[in-house]
Image (tube, rainbow, N blue to C red):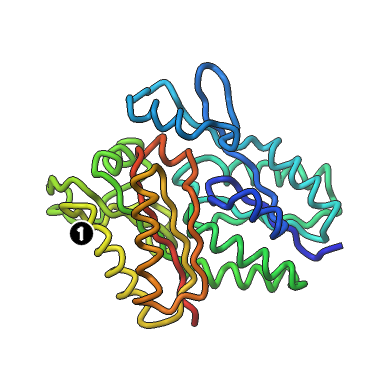
Amino acid sequence: MNKVAIVTDTISTIPQQMAQECGIKIVPLYVVMDGKDYPETEVDRQQLYERIRKKDRSITTSSPSPGSYLKAYEELSQKAESVLCITFAPSLGMAYKAATQALQIAKEELPQATIIVIDCQTACGAQLLLVLAAAKAAAQGGSLDEILELVNDLMARLNYIALLPTPGAEQMKNERRATYMDDDRLKSMASPQSIMEMGASTEGVMTILAKVESRAEGMEKLIEIARDRSAGKKLHVAINYSGTQTYDEAEELKRRLPSQFQCSEIYLTQDSLIPALHEGIGTLKLCWYSEE
């Protein structure tokens, strides 16, 4: 029996094959359309993107239920001494609440199981990096205390920055899933592209930190921010994309990073469908942490 089993959600953007190879249990979020709830892993991406482009406002999203997490806890508690659940930031949805509700039920139904739930204060590629680091430590026989120490250390160093069309950023703000940094000039700018970030430094809240005039300028800004924050240290990187155009940008970013940074690893994954339904298509996300 392993010491620790890891569970997370599909917002982490971890591909199914990678999750299976690393022993990570993935709980799906749901796309709600045409009167039914569909696990996002079973939704046709291109058809959904087309409906988003046509501004189909009938489509919504749903976080996992407490029952989904409880089922995962039951399964994993048969395979490991402890279960560590890592969810995306509560400012973006209800997964953390559902996972903690399931934990309270598990205390009665699974009294021998040790289960910890962590709000990672971020999402997407940054969450991927955190979960993979925890899973690798678990695979190497790390104890729960050792893995918790690792996770808490990395959370303070994780960076998540995103380039997206400004209407998407404004939509996130209108849904109270994002806010502006305290800069009145930024709020009044009419630039077509915005840059957002979230993590421990923003207390888990998506924050609009800059606006730019073009995608090319935005790409340069992402690299500039990474350069300023990494201070020449070796990086662990994850890049997320949605849609064909953003994939090309993501590939370009992946090609450019090794020439400007020392990169221990670079993951390139499709973004979760859930953000696309709130911020629109066309978001490019650069996530990383620097080695000590």
Q: From this view, report whether residue 133 is shown above or below residue 5.
A: below
Is residue 120 toward the left or the right of residue 213 in the image?
Answer: right
Q: Which residue shows up at 49% across the image and 31% down it?
A: 61
Q: Which residue shows up at 78% across the image and 57% down it?
A: 114
Q: From this view, report whether residue 229 is shown above or below residue 25.
A: below
Q: Quadrant of residue 131?
A: bottom right
| Place of residue 274 in the rendered image (x, y in percent of width and height, measured from the top left) | 47, 38
| Place of residue 144 in the rendered image (x, y in percent of width and height, measured from the top left) | 73, 67
| Place of residue 153 in the rendered image (x, y in percent of width and height, measured from the top left) | 54, 72
Q: From this view, report whether residue 261 is shown above or below residue 17.
A: below
Residue toward you, 124 or 45: 45
* Pointer 1 local density, CA inside 10 Å: few below 14, some 14–19, many at least 20: few
Q: Which residue shows up at 59% across the image and 67% down it?
A: 151
- The quadrant the N terminus occupies is bottom right
Q: From this view, report whether residue 283 is shown above or below residue 288.
A: above
Residue toward you, 210 or 46: 46
Please give the residue where the numbered disc 1 appears in the rendered image.
217
Is residue 11 toward the left or the right of residue 51 in the image?
Answer: right
Instruction: Identify which amino acid the numbered label 1 is placed on.
Output: Glu
Residue toward you, 255 or 287: 255
Is residue 88 toward the left or the right of residue 162 in the image?
Answer: right
Q: Quadrant of residue 141?
A: bottom right
